[in-house]
Image: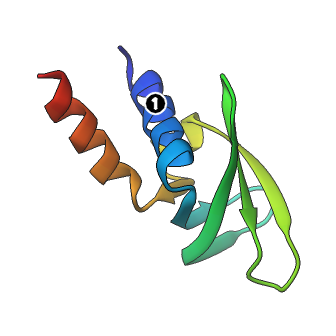
């Protein structure tokens, strides 16, 4: 299982168990965006992307992110390391 598969499985586990997560976002293009500890809800998990919804401004905004954004650290799901550690300990 490669890294993207592990991340996809971890995001899917969060989606099925507790989709309310917190993210750190650091995007440089097309404009610089940095957000820390932003509460979002995972709305969908797809083969190559996942969807989150942000309601911090009073109305819902939905964003799609490829799993590679987690690898490149453009988005960090703060609860994901815990899930990945749990999954790897169960498989051993």
Left or right side of 92 for 33: right
Quarter occupied by the N terminus: top left
* Relative vertical location of residue 76 with respect to residue 16 in this rendering, above or below: below
Left or right side of 35 for 62: right
State the residue at coordinates (59%, 64%). Answer: 26
Place of residue 30 in the rendered image (x, y in percent of width and height, measured from the top left) = 81, 57
- Quadrant of the image occupied by residue 91: top left
Query: Nearest the camera: 13 or 71?
Result: 13
State the residue at coordinates (57%, 55%). Answer: 19
Q: Is residue 72 visible?
A: no
Q: Secondary structure at mark 1?
A: helix
* Relative vertical location of residue 75 with respect to residue 71 in this rendering, above or below: below
Residue placed farthest to the right in the image?
Answer: 59
Left or right side of 62 for 12: left
* Relative vertical location of residue 15 with respect to residue 23 in this rendering, above or below: above
Residue placed farthest to the bottom in the image?
Answer: 58
Place of residue 55 in the rendered image (x, y in percent of width and height, measured from the top left) = 77, 76
Query: Nearest the camera: 67 or 12?
Result: 12
Place of residue 49 in the rendered image (x, y in percent of width and height, measured from the top left) = 68, 34
Q: Is residue 14 visible?
A: yes
Quarter occupied by the C terminus: top left
Left or right side of 19 for 14: left
Query: Nearest the camera: 37 or 18?
Result: 18
* Relative vertical location of residue 72 with respect to residue 33 in this rendering, above or below: above
Q: Which residue is mark 1?
A: 9
Residue placed farthest to the left in the image?
Answer: 92
Q: How many C-alpha atoms fall within 10 Å of the one at disc 1: few (<14), some, or many (≥20)?
A: some
């Amino acid at each position: 299982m490669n890294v993207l598969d592990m991340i996809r499985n971890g995001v899917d586990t969060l989606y099925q168990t507790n989709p309310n997560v917190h993210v750190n976002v650091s995007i440089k293009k097309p404009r610089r965006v940095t957000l820390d500890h932003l509460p979002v809800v995972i709305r969908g998990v797809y083969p190559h992307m996942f969807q989150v919804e942000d309601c911090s401004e009073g109305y819902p905004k939905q964003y799609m992110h490829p799993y590679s954004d987690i690898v490149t650290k453009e988005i960090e799901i703060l609860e994901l390391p815990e899930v990945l550690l749990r999954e790897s300990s169960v498989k051993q």
